[in-house]
Image (spheres, grey):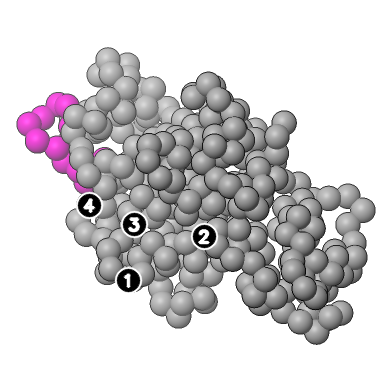
C-alpha cells in the first residue's frame, strides 16, 4: 500500500559523535567578537535531534551556560528561527508551532491542519501530553476555543486519538464506509459533513486507502473529486489533507512547500517548520516528490527564495543530493 512508502530522512545521526567537542566548537563560534555562523551550521545542521540534545546537556554541564540562550543572543531573524527550532525536541517544536497558530488575534487553520492531519494516534498522544506540560492548558481546550463547527469536531477527534491503530483493516467495512460517504455526499441533496469527518478521523490510514479505492469503484470518481463538490472551507482543507497523507504524505508536504514559495513573498514560517520537522522523517521523499511535481529541485527553489545564513541552513538540512 502506498501509505507504506519508506521514509528517507535527509538528516541522520553522525558517526563518531563527540558531544563535548561539538559543545566546545559551538562556544568557540560564539565567543569574542563576531559569530562564526558557518561553524554553528556545520555542527547543528549535521546532527540528529537526539545528538543535539546531548550537545545541549554537555554545553550546560561543561561550560555552565545555556546553549539556546547563547544562540539567541548571537543569531537573529529567520536563521535564528531555524537553529533554535533544531534545538527543540520534535514534539516540543510542533507544540510551539500549534500554540503560535492559535495565539493572539485570528487562527492559522492551515498550520493546525498541516501538523495534525498526518499524525498517528501515538504521535498525537505525545503532542497532546507535551502541549499541556508546556502551556498548562489542554490542547483540546485551546483548539475548541479557536475553531468552530465541523472543523472543530474533526480536530477534536484527531487529538483525542479516535483513529484506529495502524494496520487495522476490514475490507467488508471499507465497502460499507465507501457507500456511507457516497450517500452522505453525491448520493443526496446537500451534504452530511458528520459522516465524512467521522470516517476520515476514525479509520486507520490503511483502512482509508481501501475505502478510497472502493469509493472510486462505486462512484466512478475519486474521493478528492467528490469532496471538492461536497465540502468547503477549513473542513474541506483538513479532510483533503488527510486524504493526501493517506495516499502519499510527501506529496502533501511538497505541495505545502511549493505554496509557501509561490507568488509574491515567501511564507517563511511554513518553509522552516516543514524542513525542520520533516528532516529526520521523510524530507528526502518530499524532495523527490517536489522535483517530480514542479520540475525543479527543492534546493534550487529555496536558493531562489531565501538568502544569507538562513538560506545556507535550510539547504544544509535539505542536502543537495
Where does label 4 land, which residue?
150
Looking at the picture, tell me which residue is in the foreground, 243 or 46. Answer: 46
Mark 2: few, some, or many residues within 10 Å (few <14, many ≥20)?
Answer: many
The secondary structure that dominates the magenta segment is loop
Q: What stretch is highlighted in magenta?
A: 184-196
Callout in the foreground (1, 4)? 1
Where does label 3 land, which residue?
108
Residue 8 vs 31, above or below: the answer is above
Callout in the foreground (3, 4)? 3
Is disc 1 in contact with disc 2, using a CB cutoff of under 8 Å? no
Q: Is mark 4 on a helix, strand or loop?
A: helix
Which mark is on residue 94?
A: 2
Callout in the foreground (2, 4)? 2
Residue 201 x %, y %: 36, 47
Mark 4: few, some, or many residues within 10 Å (few <14, many ≥20)?
Answer: some
Is disc 3 in contact with disc 1, using a CB cutoff of under 8 Å? no
Disc 2/disc 3 C-alpha distance (Å): 14 Å
The residue located at (35%, 65%) in the rendering is 102
Looking at the picture, tell me which residue is in the foreground, 79 or 118. Answer: 79
Is disc 2 in contact with disc 3, using a CB cutoff of under 8 Å? no
User: In the rendered view of the protein, which quadrant contains the N terminus?
Assistant: top right
Amino acid at each position: 500500500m502506498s501509505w507504506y512508502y519508506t521514509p528517507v530522512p535527509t538528516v541522520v545521526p553522525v558517526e563518531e559523535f563527540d558531544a563535548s567537542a561539538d559543545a566546545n566548537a559551538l562556544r568557540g563560534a560564539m565567543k569574542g567578537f563576531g559569530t562564526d555562523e558557518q561553524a554553528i551550521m556545520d555542527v547543528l545542521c549535521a546532527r540528529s535531534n537526539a545528538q543535539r540534545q546531548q550537545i545541549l546537556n554537555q554545553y550546560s554541564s561543561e561550560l555552565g551556560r545555556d546553549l539556546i540562550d547563547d544562540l539567541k543572543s548571537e543569531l537573529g531573524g529567520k536563521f535564528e528561527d531555524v537553529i533554535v527550532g533544531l534545538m527543540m525536541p520534535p514534539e516540543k517544536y510542533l507544540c510551539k508551532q500549534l500554540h503560535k497558530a492559535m495565539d493572539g488575534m485570528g487562527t492559522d487553520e492551515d498550520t493546525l491542519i498541516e501538523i495534525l492531519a498526518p499524525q498517528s494516534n501515538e504521535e498525537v498522544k505525545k503532542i497532546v501530553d507535551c502541549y499541556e506540560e508546556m502551556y498548562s492548558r489542554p490542547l483540546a481546550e485551546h483548539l475548541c476555543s479557536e475553531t468552530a463547527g465541523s472543523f472543530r469536531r474533526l480536530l477534536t477527534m484527531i487529538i483525542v486519538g479516535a483513529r484506529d491503530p495502524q494496520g487495522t483493516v476490514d475490507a467488508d467495512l471499507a465497502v460499507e464506509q465507501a457507500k456511507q460517504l457516497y450517500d452522505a455526499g453525491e448520493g443526496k441533496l446537500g451534504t452530511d459533513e458528520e459522516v465524512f469527518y467521522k470516517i476520515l478521523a476514525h479509520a486507520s490510514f490503511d483502512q482509508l486507502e481501501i475505502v478510497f479505492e472502493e469509493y472510486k469503484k462505486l462512484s466512478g470518481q475519486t474521493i478528492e473529486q467528490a469532496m471538492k463538490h461536497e465540502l468547503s472551507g477549513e473542513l474541506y482543507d483538513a479532510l483533503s489533507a488527510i486524504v493526501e497523507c493517506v495516499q502519499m504524505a510527501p506529496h502533501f508536504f511538497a505541495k505545502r512547500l511549493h505554496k509557501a514559495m509561490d507568488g509574491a513573498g515567501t511564507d517563511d514560517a511554513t518553509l522552516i517548520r516543514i524542513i525542520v520537522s520533516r528532516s529526520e522523517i521523510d524530507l528526502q521523499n518530499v524532495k523527490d516528490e517536489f522535483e517530480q511535481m514542479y520540475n525543479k529541485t527543492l534546493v534550487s527553489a529555496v536558493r531562489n527564495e531565501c538568502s544569507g545564513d538562513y538560506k545556507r541552513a535550510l539547504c544544509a538540512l535539505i542536502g543537495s543530493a
